[in-house]
Amino acid sequence: MTIGQHLQEFHGLPAFDFPEADATTALPEPDAVAWRVAGSVYDAEEEWTAAFERFCAAVDTTRVRALIVGAWTEAYDSASTEVVAALLAARDRLPALRGLFLGDIVYEECEISWINQTDVTGLLTGFPDLEEFGVRGGTGLRLEAFGHTALRRLTVQTGGLPVRVVRGIGGSELPALEHLDLWLGTSWYGADTEAADLEPILSGARLPRLRHLALRNSEIQDEVAAAVASAPVVARLEVLDLSMGTLGDDGAAALLGGQPLTHLKRLDLHHHYLSEPVQQRIRETLEPAGVELDLDSRNPDEDRDEDGTVHRYVAVGE
């Protein structure tokens, strides 16, 4: 998933924009697409809840498998509270829903760190058959510890992820979860997670089926890498993703000096600050074992102030 354009597919289905009120667009079969429902972005011409009401009236929602929540009016100023309430009120009309993404909003509509979210715990407890859930935007985002026996994929995309969300996920019972993708972000936009806060996730105790772990877009990527190096969950992973952040030679050295990673199918480190000798060491260690590596997008040497302060940048902040 990227934030430069709207989702092109979700939950294995092509994304389809539910038409505006005066459109004559033919509608696909309800279970053939991931429906994107959006309101007016900059004015109240049609609130998201009104667009959703039209959607429920026009489409056989009992067959809808995937739903993408697009922009709501002035997301930079208004939280998704009413959106979440409308979805929960309609849950009996969505018995086949298995994929839900909240906040498919691109930067022309609202920068990621300006998107106002709310407590989304109710969506997960209210839709116990969900297999995939994603949310974009960290401002006001809350996710308390929850239990879910069906959820297989969980994605949280932010420019600054509140530690309360990380702790909520770490305390959750998710026996079916296979894919976890967290964009930790930067303290400039609210990130306050420390590596120690990831321990319940990295232990894997509540995530017995986890195979794909992404802890990325982080300004503390070296510390995250050091924590991952000895994490019990790594032994059963197929994909490890520490991309989009500030990973440097210290973090890579910790990874290489920790438990073996040769069992991985893929290691994604793109958008990094690794020197060429360290990149070569990673290649020599993992490529002979058949590990697919992504070492693209090396950033130039860090910005350095006159006082010697070094600056590194995550891929997605504001």
Image (tube, grey):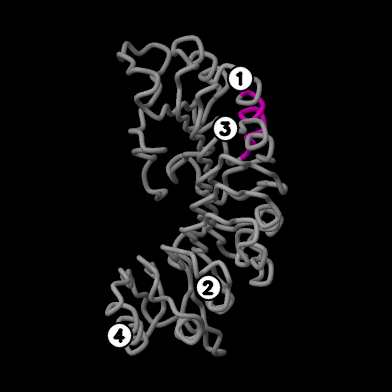
Q: Secondary structure at mark 1?
A: loop
Q: Which residue is mark 2?
A: 221
Specify which label sits upstream in the sequence, 1 or 4. 1
Q: Foreground mark, 3 or 1?
A: 3
Q: Nearer the viewer, residue 312 or 254?
A: 254
**Dot 3, crowdedness within 10 Å: few (<14), some or many (≥20)?**
some
Q: Which residue is mark 3?
A: 129
The image quarter containing residue 60 is top left
Q: Which residue is mark 1?
A: 90
Query: Which SS does the magenta portion mostly show?
Result: helix
Q: Which residues are magenta?
A: 77-86
Report how far apart the C-alphas of labels 4 and 2 lie in the structure.
22 Å
Q: Foreground mark, 3 or 2?
A: 3
Report how far apart the C-alphas of labels 4 and 3 lie in the structure.
44 Å
Q: Which mark is residue 284?
A: 4
Q: Foreground mark, 4 or 2?
A: 4
Horizontal and vertical percent position of residue 313? 48, 70
Residue in the picture at 63% in, 39% down: 77
Q: Are marks 4 and 2 in contact (CB under 8 Å)?
A: no
Q: Are marks 4 and 3 in contact (CB under 8 Å)?
A: no
Specify which label sits upstream in the sequence, 3 or 2. 3
Horizontal and vertical percent position of residue 243? 43, 66
Q: Secondary structure at mark 2?
A: helix
Specify which label sits upstream in the sequence, 4 or 2. 2
